[in-house]
Image (cartoon, helix red, strand yellow):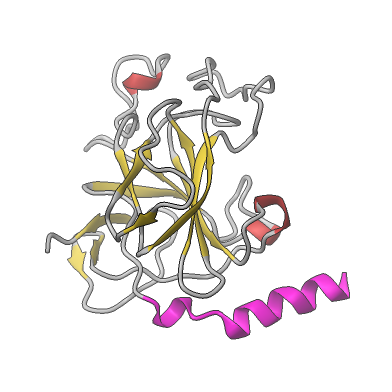
Amino acid sequence: PEETLDHFLSNLRRYRGYDWTLTLPFSGKWTVWQGFNGNWTHQGVWRYAYDFVIVDEKGKRHQANGKQPADYYCYGKEILAIADGKVVEVKDGIKDSPFMGQCMFDFLAKDMIGNHVIVQHEGEEYSFYAHLIPGSIKVTIGQKVKRGEVLGLLGTSGHSLEPHLYFHVQDRLEFHRAFGLPIKFSGLSRNDEVCSEAIPIFIGDVVKKKLV
């Protein structure tokens, strides 16, 4: 345990995320459904992860009865690279969960994190984008990407109760061995206020990328 703690703290000390320009991994207005030290799954080494969804003016995440993935406002939305980098991992071929609106995971899914993309940035930071629609990923391993480039379309593959973007930045390639890292975002508005500098965002925040 002491070695694990020391490793985590050393990553925080050396991490450059607070002076590294990151932009939101999507366009339009989204809500932080689960944030740092989340109530459900964002604990321990994944404590700096985010779940993002889209909600309407009534606070609902879906139309109709929410029994189909396409009922959810964020389903099929483009997911974007947060910074320049190189694609180092792509996982595809995992179906969307069939259990929408039932509060149940698809435990037969071949990978709990579903279809995903990992991009390596300068240094040892890796951005991680999960639960993409099967067959929607636009990039390949080794491909260089620019900030804002489309990586894939958001789905609900893997262990996902409903469509949402699971996103974090980690300190190494291997998801199950990595430590999540704290980050701030720039070029956005938060809760309808334009932010002039990079900021952290938290559960319940409504965020939108500024148009350039």
Q: Nearer the viewer, residue 173 or 23?
A: 173
Image: 175 above or below 9: above
Question: Can see residue 101?
Answer: yes
Where in the figure is residue 194, as x and y percent of width and height? Answer: 18, 68
Residue 49 image position (x, y, % from top left): 54, 56
What segment is highlighted magenta in the picture?
1-20
Q: Quadrant of residue 201?
A: bottom left
For the point 39% across and 43% down, which residue is it? 139
Q: Is residue 49 magenta?
A: no
Residue displayed at 62% across by 57% down = 173
**Residue 184, relative to residue 89: is it above or below?**
below
Which residue lies most toward the front here? 142
Q: From this view, report whether residue 95 is shown above or below residue 29.
A: above
User: Residue 209, position in %: x, y?
Assistant: 22, 58
Q: Foreground residue, 3 or 35?
A: 3
Q: Residue at x 21, y 78 (%)?
A: 196
Image quarter where the C terminus lies is bottom left
Q: Do we see residue 35 in this rendering?
A: no
Left or right of 95? Residue 8 is right
Front in this rendered view, residue 198 or 118: 118
The secondary structure that dominates the magenta segment is helix
